[in-house]
Image (tube, rainbow, N blue to C red):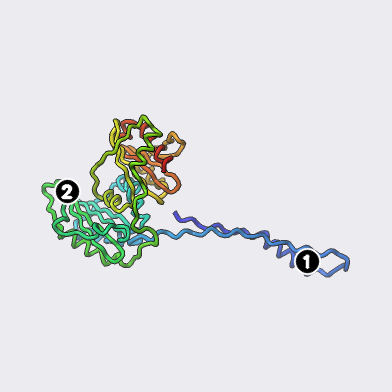
Amino acid sequence: MTKLPRRAMASFMVVSALMLSACAAEPETSSSSSPTPTPTPSQSPSPTPTPEPIAQAFGGDCAEMLSDAEVSDLFGPPIELDPVREARQRIAEEASVIREGGIVCNWVFDQVGLGVVVLPVSVVPPELHVSVPEEACMSGFTDCSWRTVSGPWWMETTEWPTSSYETWAESPERVEALSQMIAPRVLAWSPPAVGGAAEPLLDCTELLAAVNAAVPAAGLVESGWGIAGLEAIALMTNIVESCAWSNESGIISLRVQRDVGAPDSADLRTVGAEEYSLPNGVHGHLVMLAPEYGTLVATAGDTRVAISGDSVANDEQGTAAILAAVLDAL
């Protein structure tokens, strides 16, 4: 999404110069003839600077992290990723990972899935920097993850079963070895000069009061939900801010992503998003992830705001009013 600079138009100056040259070549016919006025050159507009693309780990290419041959040697031939799932991820937390210069890579095989998240270490709290073997495999979440730091980068490598969890052999050694394979490779890239550990700007309690005042029928209360995977990483590092609410219609999971802009139109088409006009006139999109669960997403400036939950399916208009009130309050 790089903008190209505008080219200044200089045709007037070229024509003027040619006219002056022609006048200078003609002999003077009369000493009383009026001198030819010298045209004042027009000020050419300054070209629009081209924004530099964000420097991503591995150049934003998962094949630079692990080649197809290496992936096949580790787990067998990979299965083609679900394009809808990948697009949903980019609409959600992955956009903020990319904004920080990180990368998200996923592979799925016959029996196991593999995911790698890389972020600048500057945005990751110290308590999340490294793993210890006894905490690598969390049976309750049916995965094994290994966290490590390599120079200015932090990464988490996760493996999970794609079929039966009961027959899956947990192996912290396997994800640790994979992290050690990737770690030296990322040193070929440097994080961008953006980001850094940030305190959340969102006060969920204040925002809840503002939304309830704007939409009295909402009846919102603070709530909570379990998180894991990329969502957990995004929230724990504050690159994505979130509030957990609920009302009679169900769960309202609010996600605020600053400086990422609107979702890519191709991703919106892939997930079957429908255009949606919020009560305050803001243009957004409705994405139904399942008949009983959906997401409403809209953008204010460069801030992407979304509400997900069963409330979207159970009370679409009421949830749209809540999202509009959030956008007005931010």
Q: Secondary structure at mark 2?
A: loop
Spatial CA distance of label 2 from label 1 is 85 Å
Res. 158 image quadrant = bottom left
Horizontal relation, residue 210 to residue 27: left or right: left
Q: Determine contact: label 2, label 1, CB under 8 Å.
A: no
Q: Which mark is residue 142?
A: 2
Res. 220 image quadrant = top left
Evaluate whether residue 80 shows in this view: no
Res. 13 image quadrant = bottom right
Residue with the mark numbered 1: 23
The image shows residue 249 at horizontal and vertical percentages of: 30, 31
Amino acid residing under circle 2 = Thr
Specify the quadrant that holds the C terminus.
top left
Along the viewing direction, whichever of 226 and 93 lies nearer the viewer: 226
Evaluate whether residue 236 shows in this view: yes
Instruction: Look at discs 2 and 1 and give the one toward the viewer.
Output: 2
Amino acid residing under circle 1 = Cys
The image shows residue 9 at horizontal and vertical percentages of: 62, 58
Q: Is 245 above or below relative to 169?
A: above
The image shows residue 253 at horizontal and vertical percentages of: 31, 40
Along the viewing direction, whichever of 7 and 69 lies nearer the viewer: 7
Q: Earlier in the sequence, mark 2 or mark 1?
A: 1
Q: Which mark is residue 109?
A: none
| Number of marks | 2
Residue at the spot 11% in from the left edge and 47% down from the top edge = 166
For label 1, the crowd category at 10 Å Cα-Cα, with few meaning under 14, some 14 to 19 and many 20 or more, is: few
Along the viewing direction, whichever of 78 and 229 lies nearer the viewer: 229
Q: Is 169 above or below relative to 218?
A: below
Q: Is 326 above or below relative to 186?
A: above
Q: Secondary structure at mark 1?
A: helix
The image shows residue 255 at horizontal and vertical percentages of: 34, 44
Residue at the spot 46% in from the left edge and 56% down from the top edge = 2
